Structure formats: structure tokens, C-alpha cells
Image: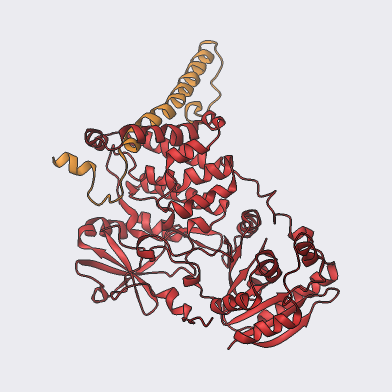
Amino acid sequence: MQEAQNVTPFLAYIDPGSGSLIIQAAIAAAIAVPVFLRSQIARAFRALRRSNGTQPSGGDDATAT
Amino acid sequence: MTRPRPDLRDASTVVDASDGRDGASFRDPSGFVFWRDGRPYRQVQHAFAAEWDAFSASDLKRRLVDRRLLIPDEPADIGLAAAPGAHAVVRPERIDFVSYPFEWTFGELREAALVTLDLQLEAMADGWSLKDASAYNIQFQGARPILVDSLSFERLEDGAPWFAYRQFCEHFLAPLALVARVDVRLSDLLRVHLDGVPLDLAGRLLPRRSWLSFGLLSHLHLHARAQVRHAANLDDGRSARQARLPRARLEGLIRNLRSTIAGLDWDPAGTEWADYAEHTSYGERATAHKDRVVDGLLREAPGSRVWDLGANTGRFSRIAAEAGRTVVALDIDPAAAERHFRSIRAEGRTDILPLVVDIANPSPPLGWAGTERRGLLERADADAILALALVHHLAIGQGVPLPMILDLFADLGPSAIVEFVPKDDPMVRRLLSTRRDVYPDYSLEGFRAAASTRFEILREAAIEDSPRVLFLLRRR
């Protein structure tokens, strides 16, 4: 009960809409997928370069997207 | 046909009832705006005391106010409280002229949307969140949008979704997408749907191609489907309240929404008036002379506020602003007003506010009891109105008799600078080329007679190299 009250403060006076709350997690997950994939690809590239004996180009590829 | 002549200047400052409560400030139980002696105050209720005190003392508020993203306020005597339950009373800075989203240009609505999301991102970084995202909470100072509701901030609870997501999408995303992807005239939907354009309606009006945009697909089309699927089901309501997403994910969602909005664009061309300024009928000499005459008459007209009716892309609004006036620039044409807004924005001006308004069909009072969103005429606060190259459009284009036109001008302000364009002017000949001339009173003499019923004619100046005449009028 306490938990439920915390989740929706009674001062949230506008109707957030059930569908609008539920869909946010799904959309946010979909947005996060490409970001995750990009960071994995970048990591793979770095690993590849290291194994080829070249220096990584510096900077943080994973977060530079 | 005698009409009452209310003092509109008073009506524009103090709204509604005995306690002076603002007619638009009643939904949020955290507090409300009220008016005393023509100044706005905000009362904060006990129920919101903890959030208010924390936000007021926060670095976030200081930063947002410093950057002119949030309206500044100063503490006021709590004895001024307009109703029981007051925790605090503050005096916010006053907005020059209150405008509404359905009067904004596309660019203004988009700027308001972007500033709302920027506020949300900045708030989230400090552990706060906007509890509402109403377009009516944004006002314009010239080209600069600012959040006027300092009660909108609540502490962000970890893992909670954004409660204002729906409101944001309906107030901003849907109308912007409709203008960018379908037709600028669909922005009129905001005048009917005061709480934003329903997403399912927007979804039906948008072309199929819009499903190919990730932003529109997710925030609008799938969002609309989710609303329909989960509507009015109590169990869904309960599970929705337990919906969770990590803060980084929520931030990603808001950033994606922001880039979706930023990616919506509209080319202000192809409407009736978009190229009007470039296609006026008279030569350089007449134009230069008209500029000088308008400037001279403006300097003779007293006061600081000018309403430029039929402002087009703002040539004369600018002259008024350069003469030290603040200008509300109204034009029926969304493309002309948009161009005007873009040029003002490029210069960072805060003294001209372009709006899309049809002076022959001004914004009516809307919302609860007809007092929530005030009509344009109730908001009239001009010291002087400019009506240049406008009267012939109203008299011949719209068929409004001259005395009625002058009557409206007199209701809008105590002084008026009006241009009369006679029938032998090429622009009027063009208007008459497709209709029968049923306007026998439309003449310089007829104009003088009509003006004299409500005004004193102080000056009359013929424009060189043109049959046009400018008048400086003072209300009787």
C-alpha cells in the first residue's frame, strides 16, 4: 500500500493514462537496443584491433555514438 | 447598433471571481495563481509544502531561472493568501502578453516542446521531474519560451515512468507531426482539443509513411494503440501504476522524443500570403516613404504596447519595436507568421511576439466556464494598434462594413495607425476583379466618416507615389 502511494504521488493530478505508462518501458527498451548493439560492436572492433596488434584509436567509442 | 465599450485593459489583468483567482488555475491542487492590483501571485498549498520548499531551495531552480527557462518569483506576504491552506505566497514575474498554443506558429510550438523536454532532462539530472507538460504552461517573451508554472516540479521517484508523457505527446507531438507531415491547417485542432490532440485521431490523419519514422511510430502510433488497449480497464490501471523503467532508460526515451520533435520541420511557403511582402504593388520610393511615415506616427502615438494587425512577416512590427514598443504581431497566415518568428528568433528579440490570429475571427473564450482560456479581445491591452494594408482585406475581402472595422479597432486600443487603400490601388483592383463592386461606401470620404464616429483624426498622410493614405486616430 505504502509502495503504491509512492509510485503515484497523489499530487500527480493529470491522468497519466495506463497505456501511456505501460508503453514507455517498451519504447525505452527498443531505444536502448541499438545503443547496446552499437556499444557491443565497438567493443568487438577494439578487441579485434588489439588482437591484430594495432593500438586502439583512443577515445571511448562505446559512448561516442 | 450601440455597443457597450468595456474597459478592456482592466479585463486583461484581473480575471474572474471575488478571490481574484486566475480562471486557468484550478486543476492542480498544489496551488494556484491569483491577481491583486493587476499583479499575479502564486499561492502554494500545505499539501505541496515539502516539494515546494525543496525545489525553491534547489540549485536546479536557480539555474533554470538564471537561464530564463523558468519564470522567476520572489517571496510575498503570506497574509495575501486568497484561500485557506496556504503554505507560501510568491510573486512571479509578469508575462507581457498571454498567448495560447493554438495561436502559435509551428516554430513557436516546436520551441515550446523542446524547452519542455530540456527542462525535463535537466530536472531529471537533479532528481526532479515535470509532473505536467501542458503547452499552456509555456509562455513567450518575444521569441523566447519560458515555463511559467513553478509548481510543475516534483521529486523523481527512482524507476517511475514519466507521468506527463501522454500530455506531452498530445499537446506537442501530435499537432507538430500533423503540421509537418500533413497540413498546417490541422494546427487548428488545438483550438478544439484544449487538452491536446488525441493520439488516435492524429494517427488516423497521418500518412502511412509516418510509420517508417521510429519516433512517430513509437511515441505516436504505438502509443495511441497502447492507450486504446489499456483504456478503462481497472486492472490495467493498477499494473500501469507499477510500470517501471530504469532512470537511464527514461532519459533515453526523453532524448529520443526530443530528437523526434527536433526532426519535425515545416517549410513556410505556398500559403496565400507567404510571398506577399515580396509581391507588394508599389515601388521602392513609396515603401521607403511609408516606413518613415509609420515611424513618425508611431512616435506620436502614446504608450508602450502595439498590436500590429495583419503584421505579415513583420516589417512594421520591427519599426515599432525600434521605436521602443513591445509588439504583438497578429497575422492570419501561418507561413508569414512563421517567417516572422524565425527572423525574430534569429535576432534573439524579446520585444515582438508573432501569433497566428484571424482578426476577422479572433480566438474566442474557451474552456471551463469560458474563463479558462480568454478570448483575444479580452486580452486586448494595446496602447496603439497598427492596421496597415489591412482594411481593404476586411472591407472587400471579408465584406465587413467600414464602421464595424473601425469599431473593432476602437475596442482594441485607444490609438490607431490605419492605412486606407482606395479602389484605384492595384491591390484593391485585384480584389475587385473577381467580385461585383457592392462597396459604394468604400472611399476615402467613407473611411473618414466611419473613423470619425469612434475616433478623432489627428493626422492624415498620403504615401508618395501611391494612392494610399495613412491615418493617426485617437479614440474619443
Q: Quadrant of residue B239?
A: top left
Q: Quadrant of residue B220?
A: top left
Question: Residue B195 location, x and y as percent?
Answer: 40, 51
Residue furthest to the top in view is A52
* Residue under the point 38% across and 46% down: B167
* Residue under the point 50% across and 71% down: B377
Is the residue B138 above or below the residue B317 in the image? Answer: above
Is the residue B222 above or below the residue B304 in the image? Answer: above
Question: Residue B162 location, x and y as percent?
Answer: 34, 42
| Image quarter of the N terminus of chain B | bottom right
Is the residue B297 above or below the residue B245 in the image? Answer: below
According to the image, what is the colour scheme of the structure? Answer: by chain
Query: B440 left or right of B227?
Result: right
Query: B211 left or right of B299?
Result: left
Q: Quadrant of residue A5?
A: top left
Judge by depth and name the residue closer to the eye, B450 or B285. Answer: B450
The hue of chain A in the figure is orange
Question: Residue B101 location, x and y as percent?
Answer: 49, 56
Q: Is residue B392 visible?
A: yes
Query: B45 left or right of B174?
Result: left
The hue of chain B in the figure is red
Question: Residue B275 location, x and y as percent?
Answer: 73, 55
* Residue under the point 30% across and 61% down: B26
Judge by depth and name the residue closer to the eye, B188 or B46. Answer: B188
State the count of labels. Answer: 0
* Residue under the point 18% across and 40% down: A4
| Image quarter of the C terminus of chain B | bottom right
Q: Is residue A65 visible?
A: no
